[in-house]
Image: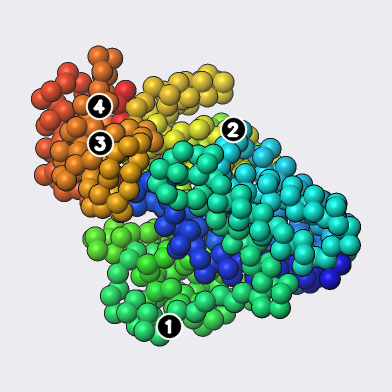
Amino acid sequence: MNTLNGQIFKEMLESGCNNLTNQKKEIDARNVFPVPDGDTGTNMSLTFTNGMQEVNKSGSDVLSVVAKTFSRGLLMGARGNSGVILSQIFRGVSKAVKDKNEVNVREFAAAMKNGSAMAYKAVMRPVEGTILTVVREATDRAGAYVDENPEASLEEYVDILCKEAKDALDHTPDLLPVLKEAHVVDSGGSGLVVVFEGFRAYLSGAPIKEAVESEAVEEEKNEKASGYATEFILEISDANKNFFRRDEFRKSLEKYGNNITVIVDDQTVKVHVNTMTPGEVLTIGERYGEFTRIQIENFKYDLSPSILEEKKEEVPAEQKKYGIISVAAGDGLARLFTEYRADVVVSGGQTMNPSTEDICAAIRRVNARHIFVLPNNSNIIMAAKQAAEVTEDKDVIVLETKSVPQGLSACISFNPDAELKENEEAMKEAAANVKTGQVTYAIKNTTVNGREIHAGDYMGLYDKDIKLTDVDKVSAAKRLVDEMMDEDSEIVTLIKGKDASEEECKQVADYISGHYDVDVDVEDGGQPVYCFVIGVE
């Protein structure tokens, strides 16, 4: 095969998407740190799936249209840094095949190299030993092969692309010491290799199909009724209202959960489902329109009131000067950010990164001239910036808050009567003055920075570094506080997560008050993953 057209490209993408979906859990498990937040595979899979859904909805087989539609779908569905980088790779490919019905092998190789260049440009400080290295080395070497062998077929090019990507992936630990110490390769690079291998499978005549869970697995999932109670209210778009079928929609949800309720009122759909994979459920909803409310709760805990009977929040008629959007996981944190003037709180955080479209939807709900977005997580910043870029009718300022305490401090420093620049500088300064600590548990045995960590241990994380381990969460929190405090510390915010009791939280708060001359603010955040989140100012 010497040319690539839209139909072939679409089939390649479908095979790559299915391969990524089938292997996302293995990619998640390659997380370097033993924190229960490995979500690279899931983020990349959800991102890629959103792109394919847009391609399929378009119905086009024209190469330039397929590439552009896929790129747009990736852009809006991008979750996490890995998802954003993936979207930029195919954005570069799309730009290179603009207005073309087909390309030859050399042109496709050039398009892939353009995708690599676009991905590097999207990252402010590119780090080698990541997905960026894998895409650059693979496209450079495979492109060089085509230059040296002008008669090379598409199959030969993709075969070389896969081999070079795998070789680059295998060498990522040589570029990132943290990977070598943990005996893993880069997870984002792993996802890209899986996509390329899906391309090769299609061209070899054996396209990858999406794996279907066995009936035994389905039965077990339904009997346990565990995981997350996921509820959302969805407004079906005008473009999709004629395609939505309640029974088909419910059948799609049944693949991922049980105890399903679907209420349809004109173009509004209200859904409840218990599921182990809330991201998959949300992806099904995203196919048809825009979320107006989302609530996800760990099923083993008492749920907050259902949102199914709540009315859609309306955008205020009068435009105001400022608006604030914050990202947070947990009802307590959502209430807290709302009290601190956040107009919209997007549900998300570790293990549940919101997509670019999720943030865009929040921006559309805020009727303000200037909108501050607080990602509150380093893995959400790039998606937030993409949302700001595609928003044309509002001034969106993304403040690079990397933790919930930083976001809270930025909100507190906001002054509705101040000028824009004054507010932006004050909020940035407030966030920068916050030190963040978190206590969570280890999910596997590993070694990080020479420290041996055992599955089940509690870890104290200071910013991104694992500072200590302990068999007891309260003891870990106390020791972490000691690591964080200094003579300039004045305020400590202690945020209780779902996995900590009131008594455990009181013990930590009493320890802080008894050992340090600081003001202690205790909040019930209800956040998953982290038993305690500690902010020190």
Q: Position of residue 138 (x, y in %)?
A: 69, 51
Quarter holding residue 341: top left
Q: Is disc 2 placed on a helix, strand or loop?
A: loop
Q: Amino acid at mark 3?
A: Leu
Indicate which disc, 3 or 1, sits on the residue closer to the N terminus: 1
CA distance separating discs 4 and 3? 9 Å
The image quarter in which residue 70 lies: bottom right
Please count the marks in the image.
4
- SS of the residue under disc 1: loop
Q: Is residue 401 left or right of residue 474?
A: right
| Residue at the disc numbered 4 | 483
Q: Is residue 123 above or below residue 88?
A: above
Please provide percent x and percent y for residue 523. Answer: 25, 39
Distance, label 4 to label 1, CA atoms, is 48 Å
Residue at image mark 2 = 125
Q: Earlier in the sequence, mark 1 or mark 2?
A: 2
Nearest to N terminus: mark 4 or mark 1:
1
Q: Position of residue 382 (x, y in %)?
A: 57, 41
Separation (CA) of disc 4 from disc 2: 29 Å
Q: Earlier in the sequence, mark 4 or mark 3?
A: 3
The residue positioned 48% from the left and 58% from the top of the image is 27
Residue 302 place in picture, x, y as percent: 23, 60
Which dot marks residue 214? 1
Q: Is residue 96 above or below residue 396?
A: below
Work out how far the residue at label 3 is from the one at label 2, CA to CA, in angstroms: 28 Å
In the image: residue 84, left or right of residue 430: right
